[in-house]
Structures are given as C-alpha cells and as structure tokens.
Image (cartoon, rainbow, N blue to C red):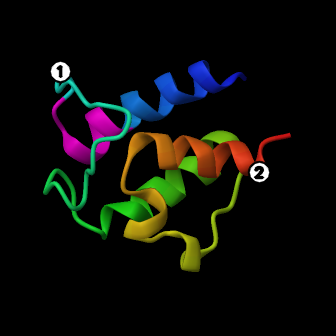
C-alpha cells in the first residue's frame, strides 16, 4: 500500500468513525483535536483501527495530540511501521 492509498483509507475512517461527518472537507494538516473535531480519547479508537486494519500496534505513549493531531501525522505514524 502506498502513501496515497493509506491516506485515503485513514481519511475515510477518520471522517466516518471519528469525526462522524463523512462529507467534511478535512485538510491533510488540519488540527483535529486542537480544532475541536475530535477529543483526545478518539486516539485510542484510531489505535485499535490501525491494529485491526494494518496489523500495526501503536504504543499508548505514541497516541498523543502532539503525535496524531492531523491526518498527515497519522499517516506518517502508520507508514513508519509498515513493511
């Protein structure tokens, strides 16, 4: 899976399951937590999604606003562990 395919999959998950606004025009660098679209507890849901979908475990200390506030940050974090 290349970066664009991964980004599309994560974007769909974020819009449908985290933000719950499938038609929202989410920018790649838009702050979702700091911008009030989701709360920090949603990052646990993202962690479960990544593990179930891609087989990648993101350790709890990495599930932070600083690391995963934007779509680009989420994609970067998953890409780091993809082989």
Residue 53: image x %, image y %? Answer: 61, 40
Residue 74: image x %, image y %? Answer: 50, 48
Residue 78: image x %, image y %? Answer: 64, 47
In the displayed structure, 17 sits above or below 1; it is below
In the displayed structure, 46 sits above or below 21; it is below
Residue under numbered circle 2: 81
**The N terminus: image quadrant:** top right
Compute the Cα span from label 1 to label 2.
Answer: 29 Å
Query: Upstream in the sequence, badge 1 or badge 2?
Result: 1
The residue located at (56%, 76%) in the rendering is 60
Q: Nearer the viewer, residue 50 or 61?
A: 61
Q: Nearer the viewer, residue 45 or 77?
A: 77
Q: Residues within 10 Å of mark 1 (few under 14, many from 20)?
A: few
| Quarter of the view holding residue 79 | top right
Residue under numbered circle 1: 23
Horizontal placement of 64 versus 79: left or right? left
Q: Is residue 17 magenta?
A: yes
| Quarter of the view holding residue 76 | top right
Q: Which residues are magenta?
A: 14-21
In the displayed structure, 47 sits above or below 8; it is below
Q: Nearer the viewer, residue 20 or 3?
A: 3
Residue 25: image x %, image y %? Answer: 20, 24
Q: SS class of the residue under badge 2?
A: helix
Q: SS class of the residue under badge 1?
A: loop
**The C terminus: image quadrant:** top right
């Amino acid at each position: 899976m290349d970066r664009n395919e991964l980004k599309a999959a994560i974007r769909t998950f974020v819009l449908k399951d985290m933000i719950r606004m499938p038609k929202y025009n989410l920018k790649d660098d838009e702050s979702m937590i700091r911008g009030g679209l989701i709360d920090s507890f949603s990052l646990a849901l993202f962690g479960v999604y990544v593990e179930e979908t891609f087989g990648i475990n993101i350790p709890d200390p990495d599930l932070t606003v600083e690391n995963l506030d934007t779509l680009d940050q989420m994609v970067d974090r998953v890409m780091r562990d993809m082989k």
